[in-house]
Image (cartoon, helix red, strand yellow):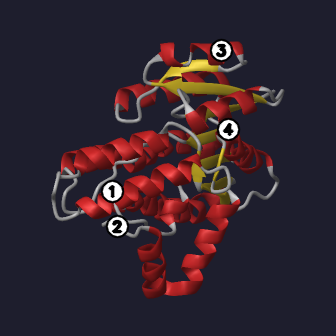
Amino acid sequence: MTTPVLITGTSSGIGRATAVRLARRDDFTVYATARRLDTIADLEEAGARLLALDVNDERCMAEAVDTIQSQHGSVGVLVNNAGFGQYGTVEETDLDGVRRQFETNVFGMARLTQLVLPAMRAAGRGRVINVGSMGGRLVFPGGGYYHASKYAVEALSDALRFETAPFGIKVSLIEPGLIRTAFGDTAACTLSDAAHPAGPYDRLNTAVDQQMAASYRSKLLSAPAESVAAAIERAATATRPRTRYVVTPAAKTLVHTRRLLGAKLFDAYLRMQFRAPR
């Protein structure tokens, strides 16, 4: 008997790499999901089953969970991966966009988790793996709202881990650093859209945009999506999974540096990294 794995946001990047990796295993039945099935049709050839799922649509989420539970009794592993980055300064960013980001990154994740937990509790087992970010442990300028959503994922994961442990449910948080996917390009676009030409933050926005582009291109600072998929596999299969998996050496260094330096010294470090061009 195989363990059913439900993965959100598999049309690209981390979600797609995770679906492909886990579908190779004989002990998992992988359900790859996306809002549009045509974007993940090839994952069926890789061995995954396909489900339409939009984490902003209550009925859609409930139907996907019901489909899996009707066949397996419960979801064995939930991988909450769906998310996106809304970048821009705190003052300039449109709050409607921020609300959409929180609906996907936080509330969609929370609601889908709520939907799978009753059957997991009844089964006395299950795993919830939330894909957060190193951005839930430290903050870069121009990304305050994105980081805020990932800090929320940190808090919810910590609470959930404690609350569900008595029912045999294990909760892990994946904290990727810079991953070479379309996310970097999307983040840069939202930063450009949020900025006002010749506005008060134009130099800062230019510096952040340039630093972001260079960092995502760097093979020293970034890593492929497969490295995150490998961490998710470990969280899904380990007898005693970690509470957190920080992915990429650069992310581990930054998280450790932020903890050691404190706020003022880390701000000084950021001023050097994001020096506005004159």
Q: CA distance from mark 1 to mark 3?
A: 42 Å
Quadrant assignment, res 78: top right
Query: Farthest residue in the front direction?
Result: 278
Q: Residue at x 53, y 20 (%)?
A: 51
Asked whether disc 3 touches disc 4, contact meaning CB atoms under 8 Å apart, the reply is no
Q: CA distance from mark 2 to mark 4?
A: 48 Å
Residue under label 1, please give it: 206
Q: Residues within 10 Å of mark 2 (few under 14, many from 20)?
A: some
Provide residue 267's location: percent of width, then percent of height.
42, 79
Q: Is residue 222 visible?
A: yes
Residue type at mark 4 is Gly
In which quadrant of the rendered image does the N terminus lie? Answer: top right
> Mark 1 or 4 closer to N-term?
4
Residue under label 2, please give it: 276
Q: Which mark is residue 44?
A: 3
Q: Residue at x 51, y 33 (%)?
A: 9
Q: CA distance from mark 2 to mark 3?
A: 47 Å
Q: CA distance from mark 1 to mark 2?
A: 7 Å
Q: Is residue 243 visible?
A: no
Q: Residues within 10 Å of mark 1 (few under 14, many from 20)?
A: some
Q: Residues within 10 Å of mark 3 (few under 14, many from 20)?
A: some
